[in-house]
Image (spheres, rainbow, N blue to C red):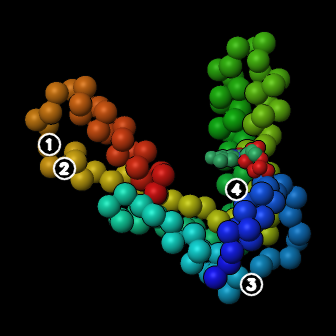
Amino acid sequence: MISHEQLHDVMQTRRSVRRFRPDAPSRAIIESVLASAVTAPSASNKQPWRFLVVRNRDVIDRIAAAVRTAVERIAMAIDPEFEPSFRAYGDYFTRFEHAPVVIVPLSRSLTILSNLTGGRLARDDADRITAMERESGLRA
Ligand SMILES: Cc1cc2nc3c(=O)[nH]c(=O)nc-3n(C[C@H](O)[C@H](O)[C@H](O)COP(=O)(O)O)c2cc1C
């Protein structure tokens, strides 16, 4: 058991890492990290997540390339005045590409209420429920 002070220190010193050592962590470490991650609470305890552990350099490169393409599409739709700053921001979206392992978290929407109510709710309520269900998966 760790103390409140130790937990506080861990939380205070956590930071986003954007430069990575080239050596990949062992499978045991990755499994241990994921075992911690899945202790997170989820709506109705559905645990609506899966994790893709990507070690293949070619696949990581292709994911980064797909993100760059999406950034490019968005940049084309941005007011030219803000395009340079958007591109600088978008550069952060691919910082993962030099990591030796990339973990892609997947979540699915929980559609319990939509399923139970079918098409019988007023449009506004149905829309709110759909939005909430989409988000509840993401926050799980
Ligand atoms: C939902 C979410 C998405 C993020 N996406 C990126 C990202 O694409 N690229 C990146 O470099 N950092 C990303 N970050 C990290 C934030 O920029 C970072 O948490 C914030 O600047 C605070 O810095 P810190 O985590 O070091 O305290 C993301 C953080 C969150 C919570």
Q: Residue 62 carries which label?
A: 4
**Residue 68 spot, x, y in % from top left:** 72, 42
**Residue 36 spot, x, y in % from top left:** 59, 74
- Marks 3 and 1 in Cβ contact (< 8 Å): no
Disc 3 element: loop
Q: Which of marks 3 and 4 is in front?
A: 3
Q: Which numbered disc, 3 or 2, marks the residue that appears first in the sequence?
A: 3
Q: Which amino acid is tagged 3?
A: Ser
Residue 93's quadrant in the figure?
A: top right
Q: Residue 118 carries which label?
A: 1
Q: Which numbered disc, 3 or 1, marks the residue that appears first in the sequence?
A: 3
Q: Tell me, yes or no, if residue 41 can be seen here.
A: yes
Q: Count neighbours of disc 3 (C-alpha within 10 A) and say few if under 14, some if 14 to 19, many if 20 or more.
A: few
Residue placed under numbered mark 3 in the picture: 26
Task: Say which quadrant the N terminus sits in.
Answer: bottom right
Q: Residue at x 83, y 55 (%)?
A: 18
Residue 8's quadrant in the figure?
A: bottom right
Q: Which numbered disc, 3 or 4, marks the residue that appears first in the sequence?
A: 3
Residue placed under numbered mark 2 in the picture: 115
Q: How far apart are marks 4 and 2 (CA)?
A: 36 Å
- Marks 2 and 1 in Cβ contact (< 8 Å): yes
Q: Tell me, yes or no, if residue 54 can be seen here.
A: no
Q: Count neighbours of disc 1 (C-alpha within 10 A) and say few if under 14, some if 14 to 19, many if 20 or more.
A: few
Q: Which amino acid is tagged 1?
A: Gly
Disc 4 element: helix
